[in-house]
Image: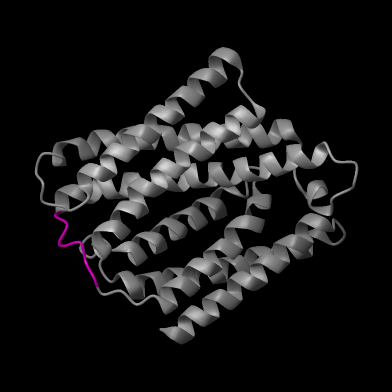
Amino acid sequence: MELLGTLTIIGYTLSTLSIRYVLIDEEYSFYKKTSFDIVFFLSLLLFSVYSYSIINNVYQKFNFITSLQITFLIVNYLFFLFMFSKPIKHLGLVLLPLTAIAIFISMIYHDNASLGLIDSDLRAHIIVSIASYGFLGLGAIQAILLRYQEKKLKDVSDSLFLTILPSIEKMEKVMFDLIIFGFILLTLSLLSGSPFVSMGEHPGLAEKILFSIIAWITYSYLIYRRFSKGVRGRKATNLTLSGMFFLLVAYLGTKLFFEIY
């Protein structure tokens, strides 16, 4: 498993370097884009096999590491699917190295703890939840890059990274597109998870839904302000990152807490 994890990290490192050259240099862009697509696709396949070897049964054994792996795996698949139709390739500059770090953590943090068996009734809830976190996670990365972009535009010095990013208008549009997709799925996730709150059979589920509701309120307020007041800039990114923070606490923080204590 260590060999497979190492190969996956190498693949994601090469993907990060490849996408950097694709975004910086437009010469021979077709060949560079094709090489990146191939390297990233192969890395994603390796990541899928590696994640499966850790998870074994995604619906039965859930702990911090499996949750982290599934989250990054879904985010990577969403990135791969949408990068051909939307201007989001720049997100790979952040997502790909973070994925490599997550894989490295899973290699050094061996955890056999389990939060118990998860019955089949929770399967739809789990799938929708992870998909919503994937979209909102990409939206959070977009918010970080947008904040960096706005900060650098105020500086006199040139930034090579700044030339890679699309215009602020496109950045904001993509961010809100991702957030709206994720918000719809998050709403479905809360609705599908609400019947299990009173059961008390799954440790951390009530806390998970509580923080998810706080995140839902944050995102709903952001979307309301977007369509009613046209909110943008720092206010929009602050709300986006705040919502993602509550989701991270809900999805990963509660699992880690119950495994430790």
Quarter of the rendering containing residue 51: bottom left
Picture mark count? 0
Scheme of colours in the image = one colour
Side of 166 where 219 appears, left or right: left
Which residue is at a point 18% across and 53% down the rendered structure image?
Answer: 203
Q: Residue furthest bottom?
A: 3
Which residue is at a point 22% across and 40% down the rendered structure image?
Answer: 193
- Looking at the picture, how far across and down is residue 36, in whole percent? 68, 65
Work out whether residue 3 can be spotted.
yes
- 54 or 233: nearer the viewer: 233
Q: Residue furthest front?
A: 261
Magenta-colored segment: predominant secondary structure: loop
Side of 196 where 144 appears, left or right: right
- Looking at the picture, how far across and down is residue 26, in whole percent? 85, 56
Q: Within the magenta stretch, is there residue 114?
A: yes
Side of 1 where 254 appears, left or right: left
Residue range highlighted in magenta: 113-119
Q: Is residue 233 above or below residue 260?
A: above
Which residue is at a point 36% across and 54% down the rendered structure image?
Answer: 252
- Looking at the picture, how far across and down is residue 239, in whole percent? 52, 32
Quarter of the rendering containing residue 52: bottom left
Quarter of the rendering containing residue 260: bottom left
- 128 or 29: nearer the viewer: 128
- Looking at the picture, how far across and down is residue 232, in whole percent? 64, 25
